[in-house]
Image (cartoon, rainbow, N blue to C red):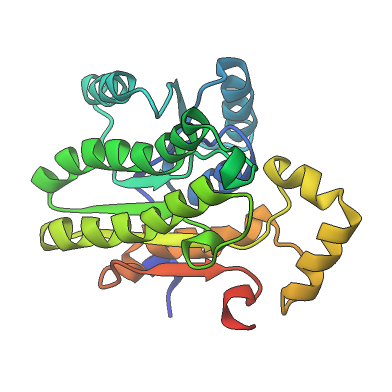
């Protein structure tokens, strides 16, 4: 089978939260498959450094620093893309934040911040992308979920609720937009070697738990999300919608 089925040549991909971590790895993978990139983050300096690193590899990259939790900023960013003649064919809703605290000690503002960053932003950015994809008659939306889209763990209640919501948001997008040839799917990463997980990686007991609980016996690497992301962004997945694919070394499959 030709790899042309997975080519993203001629497509533009917006990846939120892509100045580092999973978002950067996914963005680089989409670029390697041929996509033009629009990367995003709130730290302009870090975003510029990420864009420079990607351009040094020969990729075409536009960097847009805006807060996905600021609806006006999201709308303005899409209007800027419109004005520049940049049409987003592929959206990856990756921006996220974690906050660990028992629910009985959890302040409402911390709950809301996690929900807004991990779930509401995916709705807002997804809505703006879809408003432009629908008239064009095609589009790919990839929402980044989590193991907690399916399983709960103590001390991360708002994250669990947000990522569970990502699964259902993906299905809601499918219910409304699949008829416009827009495929919405999600990826559920397992425990990955990222900056956000560094404290857990450095904790010997938690590190042992992850390796013991995961059938693959190890943490995942950010670049191991690329294959699934390219599949969901490409023509290879044109009849796949409303799904969440776990890239987790088998964790959600076993007790």
| Residue 241 sits in quarter | bottom left
| Residue 196 sits in quarter | top right
Question: At 58% from the left edge and 81% from the top edge, which residue is drawn?
Answer: 253
Identity of the residue furthest to the front in this view: 104
Q: For this view, does 190 lie left or right of residue 124?
A: right
Residue 138 at what x, y percent from top left?
19, 53
Q: Is residue 133 above or below residue 147?
A: above
Identity of the residue furthest to the bottom in this view: 254
Identity of the residue furthest to the top in this view: 45
Q: For this view, does 188 lie left or right of residue 167?
A: right
Residue 81 at what x, y percent from top left?
28, 25
Q: For this view, does 228 lie left or right of residue 237?
A: right
Q: For this view, does 29 lie left or right of residue 75?
A: right
Question: At 23% from the left edge and 22% from the top edge, which residue is drawn?
Answer: 79
Residue 154 at what x, y percent from top left?
63, 56
Where does the C terminus fall, quadrant-wise?
A: bottom right
Where does the N terminus fall, quadrant-wise?
A: bottom left
| Residue 86 sits in quarter | top left
Nearer to me, 15 or 111: 111
Question: At 61% from the left edge and 16% from the top edge, which residue is drawn?
Answer: 45
């Amino acid at each position: 089978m030709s790899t042309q089925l997975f080519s993203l040549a001629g497509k533009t991909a917006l990846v939120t939260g892509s100045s580092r971590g999973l978002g950067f790895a996914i963005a680089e993978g989409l670029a390697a498959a041929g996509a033009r990139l629009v990367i995003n983050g709130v730290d302009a300096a870090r975003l510029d450094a990420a864009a420079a690193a990607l351009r040094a590899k020969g990729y075409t990259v536009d960097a847009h620093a805006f807060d996905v939790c600021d609806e006006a900023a999201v709308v303005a960013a899409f209007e800027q893309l419109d004005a520049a003649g940049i049409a987003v064919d592929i959206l990856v809703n990756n921006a996220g934040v974690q906050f660990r605290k028992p629910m009985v000690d959890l302040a409402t503002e911390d709950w809301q911040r996690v929900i807004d960053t991990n779930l509401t932003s995916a709705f807002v950015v997804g809505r703006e992308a879809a408003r432009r994809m629908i008239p064009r008659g095609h589009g790919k939306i990839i929402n980044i979920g989590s193991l907690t889209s399916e399983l709960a763990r103590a001390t991360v209640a708002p994250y669990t609720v947000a990522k569970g919501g990502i699964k259902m948001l993906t299905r809601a997008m499918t219910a409304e937009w699949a008829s416009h040839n827009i495929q919405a799917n999600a990826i559920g990463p397992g425990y990955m070697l990222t900056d956000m997980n560094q404290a857990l990686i450095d904790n010997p007991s938690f590190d042992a738990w992850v390796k013991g609980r995961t059938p693959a016996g190890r943490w995942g690497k950010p670049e191991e999300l690329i294959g699934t992301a390219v599949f969901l962004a490409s023509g290879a997945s044109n009849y796949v919608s409303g799904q969440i694919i776990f890239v987790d070394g088998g964790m959600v499959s076993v007790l």
